[in-house]
Image (cartoon, helix red, strand yellow):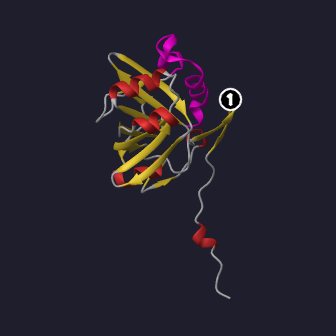
Amino acid sequence: MQNGRQAVPLEKSYLLLNHGPVTLVGSTHDGRSNVMAASWVMPLDFDPPKVVLVIDRNTLTRELIEASGEFSLSIPCREMAAQVLAAGSLSGRDGEKASRCGLEFFAASCVAAPLVGDCVAWLECRVIPCRDNQDRHDLFIAEVLAAQADPAVFSQGRWHFSDDCRRTLHYQAGGAFFVTGESFDASEQAPTGG
């Protein structure tokens, strides 16, 4: 099933990541595509919007990203936890990984790297080359070229989860996740003078 997608203004794309969800990193080069789960992904800047992520040098995803200079980030939800765990556990070097994990790709609008269906948000990214960071720290910096979200769970710059199965995931370790909790406005709890 392909959920609805609505463009997110680039200057607001950081809001898709600033709560620290697990992401699925899509990559492609020379006829090979791959997906991997990653927790070490975060927004870096607003204008132009940038993200940073850590990708181990031994992964197929890293090889494809270094060759193509681009990648995608898809933000999965609770109903996808088993597929996310598989994407973080299996190697793309052992065969086509997306179908083995029960994931389906669809085309991005600005990059060749595929996006993952059934997620709740998507970002398309172009690497800003910085060999020292990549070689020494496995750290990639990228500009966000396009962003989309499922309006049923993200609109007007805010996450709102009416369906627990569509909540974003956070990875602990050993196959354990937790989901994003309830949003609240702290300004409503601000102390009054006195």
Magenta stretch holds residue 80:
yes
- Quadrant for the N terminus in the image: top left
Task: Classify 3 as above or below 66.
Answer: below
Main SS type for the magenta part?
helix
- Residue, x 36% and y 55% (percent of image)? 11
Instruction: Give percent across and percent down for residue 153.
Output: 49, 47
- Residue, x 58% and y 65% (percent of image)? 185
What residue type is disc 1 on?
Gly
Instruction: Give percent across and percent down for residue 136.
Output: 50, 35
Q: Which residues are magenta?
A: 77-102
Name the foreground residue: 156 vs 89: 89
Task: Classify 42 as above or below 23.
Answer: below
- Residue, x 50% and y 26% (percent of image)? 57
Q: Residues within 10 Å of mark 1 (few under 14, many from 20)?
A: few
Instruction: Give percent across and percent down for residue 31.
Output: 33, 15
Circle 1 is placed at which residue position?
175
Left/right of residue 64 with respect to residue 176 in the rendered view: left
For the question of whether residue 78 can be seen, the reply is yes
Q: Single out the residue that lies furthest toward the bottom.
A: 194
Task: Classify 124 as above or below 154.
Answer: above
Name the foreground residue: 170 vs 143: 143
